[in-house]
Amino acid sequence: MTSEPTNSKRQTIIEGATRMFLKHGYHKVSMDKIAQAAPVSKATLYQHFENKNALFSAVVFELCRSLLQTMAEIATDSKDVEKNLHKIAEAFVDLIFTEKALAIYRLVIAECLDFPELGRLVYDGVPKIALTQLENYLQTLNAGGHFAIPDIAFAADAFFSLLKGDLHFQCLLGVSPPPSPEQKCRLIDRVVALYILGVLNAAD
């Protein structure tokens, strides 16, 4: 009976922390300031998060939760490969081109030289997990005879890299706006078709 308010309080803290990190950066935000922004007591804040690193990790994980959930859902389903790759691609593209995700990405790049632990924290918290889940899925496809991918790790990285492409870099720099839903659909369709063709050729 107490889990709902606890989860609600945790979510409130994450939302407050997200606003503070994006507005002021990682280095300039203290746990005291996050507690004020949430607003919660310091005791409540530390009850949920032991330090700023743990809180920032939760901010990034919350942002990427939909992608990771999608990856987990298709992990054991290899019956419709194209459909599953579409699901993964949609979740990934919907994530990386949001204004909040772009802002978090810029923040981490700006801060990671002075705080290298921040870069490692973010990478281990989401990208590494997503890559590992995709590798596991591709391995399942290999084992099921759908594909014969010679380099699973490279194939997983290539899939996400194709979806990002030059457009993601342009969006990070503010040169181009995030793609429209129609542009996302075209991107996903082309990448999945090219990827499947490339994987099949690589297996020959």
Image (cartoon, grey):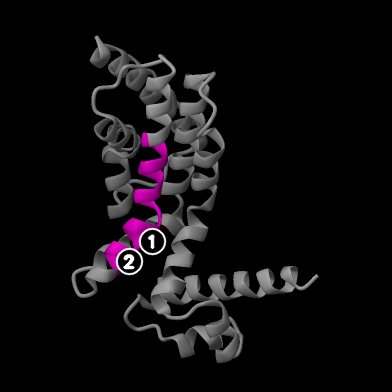
Q: Quick check: is 24 in the magenta stretch?
A: no
- Residue at the location (53% across, 31% down)? 76
Name the residue type under label 1.
Ala
Q: Do tag 2 and tag 1 residues touch (Cβ < 8 Å)?
A: yes
Q: How many marks?
A: 2
Dot 2 falls on a residue whose secondary structure is helix
Q: Quadrant of residue 10?
A: bottom right
In the shown orientation, is residue 138 left or right of residue 87?
A: left
Q: Residue at x 24, y 28 (%)?
A: 151
Q: Which residue is mark 1?
A: 103
Quadrant of image for the C terminus = top left
Q: Is residue 149 above or below residue 179?
A: above
Image quarter of the N terminus: bottom right
Image height of 80 relative to 110, above or below: above
Q: Residue at x 39, y 74 (%)?
A: 53
Q: Position of residue 62 (x, y in %)?
A: 52, 59
In the image: residue 98, left or right of residue 107: right
Picture coordinates of residue 91 (x, y %)? Answer: 50, 40
Q: Residue 202, image x and y in percent?
A: 24, 16
Q: CA distance from mark 2 to mark 1?
A: 6 Å
At a point 42% along the width and 56% down the height, the residue shown is 101
- Residue 113 higher or lower than 176, as above or below: below
The magenta stretch spans which residues? Answer: 118-135
Residue 92: image quadrant is top left
Q: Neighbour class for label 1 at 10 Å: few (<14), some, many (≥20)?
A: some
Please name the residue that numbered disc 2 is placed on: 107
Label 2 neighbour load within 10 Å: few <14, some 14-19, many 20+:
some
